[in-house]
Amino acid sequence: MRLLDEQYTRTPFYGSRRMVISLREHGCNVNRKRVQRLMQQMGIEAIYAKPRLSDPAPGHRIYPYRLRGLAITRPNQVWSTDITYILLRSGFVYLVAILDWFSRYVLAWEVSITLDTSFCLSALDWALQKATPEILNSDQGAQFTSEVFTNRLEEQDITISMDGRGRAIDNIFIERLWRTVKYEEVYLKDYVDVLEAVSNLKSYFTFYNHERPHQSLGYQTPAAIYFGKVKCA
């Protein structure tokens, strides 16, 4: 599962056949049925670069994608949120984050052992203590299309935007965040349990926001851009 996770993060377009070839190149002589079973258990599939955690529940309202062609020019103009999985030594947990598009600043994150809506709502409430965005973009997952989640946004007069089905590029910045978190933190560690995962992720997100310079931000940190403390070149 760890090799699958690493390969999927590198090549999200790989289906089970290519995954089998990749695993065999790493010395894992597995058949396609096992790979398919593990991919299903992990909630991943080929074609688009994200876990298969974005199926709306029956009856949930789907909102249009509102960011196409929109110039992102300031903090808190657009936030985005998404869920990924984090492998532990035994099993895995789900991680949700809320990201400011302009600055790449991670406003909030939460970890859960289930896909219950409550941990996504908790992250949203945490973020809303800092500021209120004009738009919040998500995928069409049941957590984000749930009435309790969308109601919280509408109560704050936040415009709701949702990715098109199978379009990872619609939420590209948080997809890049997941790759960064996994390559710079998760894959370098071997989390034993949930408590260790939470402790290490807390340290990493502090580093990511306040110490890690981003090339796309002119080598400033997300915090410097988000709070307007940009250094002179």
Image (cartoon, helix red, strand yellow):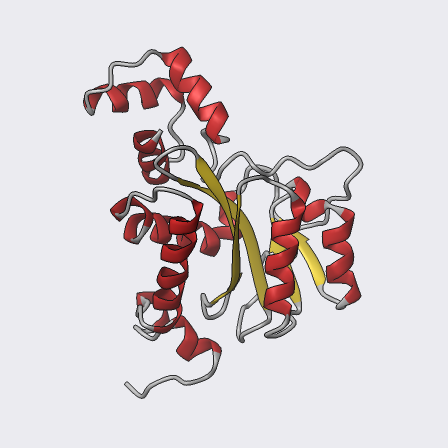
Name which quarter of the figure residue 222 lies in. Answer: bottom left
Residue depicted at 31% across the width and 52% down the height = 185
145 or 165, nearer to the observer: 145
Residue depicted at 70% across the width and 50% down the height = 64
92 or 143, nearer to the observer: 92
Q: Quadrant of the C terminus?
A: bottom left
Residue depicted at 59% across the width and 67% down the height = 127
Residue 97 visible (yes or no): no
Is residue 57 left or right of 95 when viewed as pictured? Answer: right
Q: Quadrant of the N terminus?
A: top left
Q: Is residue 18 above or below residue 148?
A: above
Q: Position of residue 147 (x, y in %)?
A: 78, 48
Residue depicted at 37% across the width and 28% down the height = 14
Q: How many marks?
A: 0
153 or 160, nearer to the observer: 153
Residue 4 visible (yes or no): yes
Is residue 184 left or right of 42 when viewed as pictured? Answer: left
Which residue lies most toward the bottom here?
232
Is residue 95 left or right of 32 when viewed as pictured? Answer: right
Name which quarter of the figure residue 80 lies in. Answer: bottom right
Q: Is residue 224 above or below residue 63?
A: below
Q: Position of residue 187 (x, y in %)?
A: 29, 44
Q: Position of residue 72 (x, y in %)?
A: 54, 69
